[in-house]
Each structure stands twice: as C-alpha cells, then as structure tokens.
Amino acid sequence: MSFELHEECGVFGIWGDADAAQKAYWGTFSLQHRGQESGGLAVLDHGTLSVDKGMGLFQDAVPVKNRRGEAAIGHVRYSTTGESAEVNAQPLLMHTRFGPLALAHNGNLVNHESLRRELEHEGAIFQGTSDSEVLAHLLARSRQKEFQDALMEASQSLKGGFAFVLLTSDGLYGIRDPRGIRPLVLGRTHEGAWVLASETCALDMIDAVWVRDVKPGELICISSRGMESTMFHESEGQNACAFEVIYFSRPDSQLEGQSMHLKRRLLGQKLAEEAPAQADVVVGVPDSSLPAAMGYAEESGIPFDFGLVKNRYIARTFIAPKAEMRSQGVQLKLSAVTEVVEGKRVVLIDDSLVRGTTSRHIIRLLRRAGAREVHMRIASPPYLEPCHYGIDTSRAGELAARNLTVKELAEMVGADSLAFLSPEGLLGALGPQGWCLACFGKGYPVPIEEDVHAQ
Ligand code: SF4
C-alpha cells in the first residue's frame, strides 16, 4: 500500500534562462513527493558550477535565497542503493578532464555492482555508495575527446531503469533508459529555455510547457546550439513503470500526455467492474488512492466520502526509510472520520498492498470508528516480486501476496473481504503503450544480475 512504497528520486534541469537557478529551485521543490531524504541544487553562473545540498526535505537541504545562474539541475532523493548519508546526496559534483560536471540520477542500475568492481579494479575511487557515481567514473575513463561522445559511450554500458540529468559549463544533458522504465520529460519555458524533469508537474510549477517525453534510449543535449537528440541505444520497446500511474507520480502530472488523475479514476472504475461489493460508502486511503476511490464510486453507484483524513504535519523522521519508523509513521498519519463510517459497510480502496501491515492498521482505525464491515479493494494486482529499477519495495520475503492466498490476506489485514484488480484490468486502464509489470510477476524487462537477485 501507498505508505510501503517509495520512489527513489526526482530530477530537474534547465538551460538558457536568466532566472534558471530560481526556476530549478521551484521545479525541484515540486518533485518533493519523489524523495524526502536529501535534496540538492547545482547552479552554473558565468561558467562556475557550484552545488548546495543536504539531508532532509528539499527546502531544509537547500535554503531559499536569491541565486543567480543561467543553468541548473536539481535532485530529491530516497535511497534504495547506497545508504541515506550526505555523501550520497545529489547532484554529485565532479572535476573531470571535460571540466566540472554535476550529475543527478533517478532509478537503479542493475549492473552497478559489476561496473563498480570493474572501475575500482582500474583504479577509480568512489566517494559514496550510491550507484549514480558509476556514470561519472565511466565518463572519466572514456577516451573520447568530446563530452557528448563520452556520455554516449558511457550510457551504452548502463543497464536498468534510469534517468540522468547532467550539467557542464557547455551544456545540459538528459538520458533515459532504453526501456523507458523511469520517466523523463522535455519542456520549454515561454522565453525559450529548455527544461528536463521527472514529471510534468515540475514544468507547470515554472510555467513551462510540455514538449514531449524523452524517448527510451535517447540522449538529449541542450547547449548554445539549441536542443539535439541522439539515440545512445536502439529502442527495445517501451516498459514504463506502471507504478508511476498507480501511485508515484503526482495526480496533476502527465505521462506520455496522459493524465495521472484520470488514469487512477479509470483504475477504480475497472476495479468496481471486476470486484463489486455490497456497501454503503466508498472510502479511499488519502491522498494517492482518492481518484481510484472516486472511480469505484462512479462505477458502482455507492457514494464516495472522506472517511480517512491525513495528518499533514508529520515530522520528517517518520518518513525516513527504516522499518520501525515506517510503522510508527503510519499510526500518526491517518485518522478515521466517525461520522462517515459509523454503522456503515465500507469499501476501502487502496492503490496497492505490499507488506499489508499498514492496511491492517487502517482497517483497525475504521472499525474503532464504528465501521460495521470493511471490504478492501486494491486498485492494482497482487505485488509479487521486488522492484530492481529504483523503487524501494522491500525484499521478496516481506511481500504479503507472495506468501498468502487472497483469503489469508483478508484475514491478516482484518477485512471482511479483499479483492485485487486483475493484470488485464490494469492494462485496460493503462492503455496500449508498453509497461513494466515485473512486480506483478510478469517478468523483468531488463534481466537482473545474480548478486542483485540474491539481495
Ligand atoms: S517492477 Fe514495478 S515498481 Fe519497479 S519499475 Fe516495474 S512496475 Fe515499476
């Protein structure tokens, strides 16, 4: 369920705007939901590249102040590879033979361990433990004369789900993995500056317009020559992360021009068709499951209401990635509204069920507030396999649906009934573009290395 899944990161970049530093600040700030452990901003001001970064929420890590610069990149982070430590906060700033380089990454390289071993064997010294540094060392090792050629060559060695933005004194660069697993969009301000971002909500924040999604396997180079596109890898077909639609992306964002809010409503409608329930009220787990709950209510004719409310003032300690803090955090995050659920048969809609511990807690909250029956409906299929492409989902042994039948799961979470959306229903709502459904047991689109499998 939503509190049990964490996006790894969000990235932002802008080139050619007199107010680039401020725009990058607000663009990155709008991606805060993609990572709350650390944040940073790299700014290019008259050829000098500098970085501000730290631990915690973006506005704590990077103080609001008047920054000047003609280009900038930003990053928010939630670690899945590498510890939650300041040394792993991004953008990383490196001094290479191409000059200073800042780099920010979203995703996970499935071959980072073998690449790192190979690079260390050749003498590379890593500053941190995150997999993002691998690209910087591959660039440093390249014999190419031009930075863009070195980036092209280095990108070809990377495997997994990834989106990088890089900034040098000559240009802003963006790369997206050959399967298009992690998102990256290209936008433009009204003044003509180019923008790269994990989500379109960051474009809206600075009043820029969406131009298109970066293609799988594409390298974007933005410089004084304008915007150039090259493919560093032939397209292997798209496998965009289905969880960006189910939960991660902000509801006001668009993926491939499709509204996340409307897609989530459609997931709820499909769920109502497939898994009806006899009930008096539909309640969604706030905030991410509310559109699916609305869709379920529309299709079933059962009224929707706000039976759960979220406490918005939780200290950030409780969204830290340690397991014991997670469960403590959930207890403080939600309350049930007695007037909505007392004496009622409730359909509880959640976007996903991963470990099941938070679902159990929420159902207990509803029963304490007087709910007569609780029928849980999940707007995605059972979560069966861990993600290796940049989403923190926990290890295979902790995935509840992998180890229990649906009936046993219902008992575990304390629901009167439980049902999931089918993979066919999910695909019906997502549409014809190719999707990654690996966590639903449909196979990993990029093969996983053995040592990663063992984790
Ligand atoms: S395995 Fe699941 S969470 Fe990971 S990229 Fe694929 S769809 Fe997204």
Image (tube, rainbow, N blue to C red):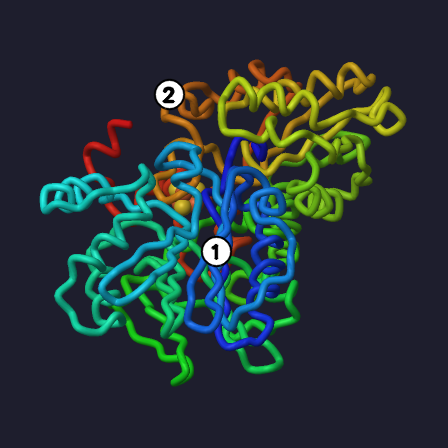
In this rendering, is residue 364 above or below 440?
A: above
Q: Position of residue 154 (x, y in %)?
A: 22, 60
- Three-letter residue code for mark 1: Val
Q: Quadrant of residue 93?
A: bottom left
Q: Residues within 10 Å of mark 1 (few under 14, many from 20)?
A: many
Task: First in sequence, mark 1 or 2: give its number.
Answer: 1
In this rendering, is residue 53 above or below 314?
A: below
Residue 266 in view, yes or no: no
Residue 175 in view, yes or no: yes
In this rendering, is residue 256 above or below 439?
A: below
Judging by the rendered image, the residue that carries numbered circle 2 is: 397
Q: Out of 109 and 275, give the one closest to the viewer.
A: 109
Q: Quadrant of residue 292?
A: top right
State the CA–CA distance, disc 1 to disc 2. 31 Å
Identify which residue is drawn at 43% across, 52% down: 91
Identify which residue is drawn at 39% across, 32% down: 83
In this rendering, is residue 173 above or below 312?
A: below
Horizontal placement of 293 versus 146: left or right? right
Q: Position of residue 81 (x, y in %)?
A: 35, 37
Judging by the rendered image, the residue that carries numbered circle 1 is: 11
Q: Nearer the viewer, mark 1 or mark 2?
A: 1
Q: How many marks?
A: 2
Name the quadrant of the N terminus. Answer: top right
- Three-letter residue code for mark 2: Gly
